[in-house]
Amino acid sequence: MARIHVKPDGLDFESRGRRDYLVTFEHPSLWGSYLVPVTVIVGPQARPGRGLASTGSTHGNEYEGPVALKHLAREIRTEDVLGRIVLIPVLNAVAFKAGRRDSPDDNGNLNRVFPGDPKGTITSRIADFVTRFVFPQVHVVLDLHAGGQVARFPALASMHWVDDAAQRSEMVETARGFGCRFLLFYQNSTPGLLTSTAETLEKVTVGGEFGWGEAVQAEGVSMCRQGVLTAAIRHEQLRGPAPANRHHKEQVVVDTADPASTTLAAFDGHFEPVAALGQKVARGERIAYLHDFGRIDDAPFEIVAPHDGHVVCQAWGTRVFAGQVVSQVGRIVS
């Protein structure tokens, strides 16, 4: 089935049925366009501003989300869609094509430029497309990430601690549908995030980390598929029943929003984890070493847990630079 080439303002989000698009973004120097695949499925009960959108590859070298959404685009039957479902398996087509976290054309990090600019760089134009044309059509936003070459996480669904209690409660319950062991609240001070922009627009917004290392983790793909389907059914956009939870029945809510939860490398060096990902640790417990091989006879620098909680992030590559995030310990939220 041939996909329809359209400009960012050319998608039909209203008519019943399924449409598979390639959204064109003019190349900044060559005569041609980057193509972002978007599938829109609209059912008989679709209402203005109500629907679910899920994005993969906001960073170009994170693959569980794209794989899961590619599967779901084939598996979701049009006749089972009640409301509106928008699937974007490869949002950052520029970085994905290059196999990089950021775009090689403008060195732009798509997850730092929201809400975007229609006359800006290619990265900023993609963000603007999501903000101006996708977000107004939906009330649920799921942004599927992985650690890439930056960090390693236990599979987790994530969100920010928004002020509105009802919105926050729906985000937590939607996050539970992925079946991750950990549900994470994290800091909301980083500018330009896709999820922060959606939350500000009062969307039920869930992100997540479902793999690492530029690989495809089978568990992460499964969790992404389960989470998107469960959310679509929970929010009355897809006919049920919800899929069975194939993963963790017992889930732990943790919080790393406190800057003290994060440890930065004190110097350029080599990172050696001691604690396992997900391990429960006590304040002051050793969780890693940082080695300086320029001072081969010195003892390594000891990294300890800043407080009680669970190890939810570690540097992926052993070579780290001064100031790099090398570990996070999430406080347990009762």
Image (cartoon, rainbow, N blue to C red):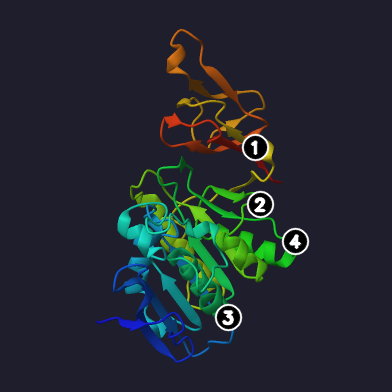
Label 2 Cα crowd, 10 Å radius (few <14 / some 14-19 / many 20+): few
| Spatial separation of the CA atoms under disc 2 and disc 1 | 14 Å
Q: Position of residue 52 (x, y in %)?
A: 52, 74
Lower sequence index among marks 4 and 2: 4
Question: In the rendered view, does 205 fall on the left or right side of 83?
Answer: right
Please name the residue that numbered disc 4 is placed on.
Answer: 163
Q: Could you tell me the amino acid type at mark 1?
A: Ser
Q: Could you tell me the amino acid type at mark 2?
A: Ser
Q: Position of residue 220 (x, y in %)?
A: 41, 52
Residue mark closest to the camera, 2 vs 1 = 2
Looking at the picture, tell me which residue is in the foreground, 218 or 60. Answer: 60
| Spatial separation of the CA atoms under disc 4 and disc 1 | 21 Å
Question: In the rendered view, does 60 fall on the left or right side of 254?
Answer: left
Lower sequence index among marks 2 and 3: 3
Q: Position of residue 34 (x, y in %)?
A: 34, 70
Q: Residue furthest front?
A: 29
| Spatial separation of the CA atoms under disc 2 and disc 3 | 28 Å
Lower sequence index among marks 4 and 1: 4
Please name the residue that numbered disc 2 is placed on.
Answer: 189
Lower sequence index among marks 4 and 3: 3
Q: Which mark is residue 261?
A: 1
Please name the residue that numbered disc 3 is placed on.
Answer: 50
Res 1 quadrant in image: bottom left
Label 4 Cα crowd, 10 Å radius (few <14 / some 14-19 / many 20+): few
Query: Residue at left 57%, top 87%?
Result: 47
Residue 242 visible? The answer is no
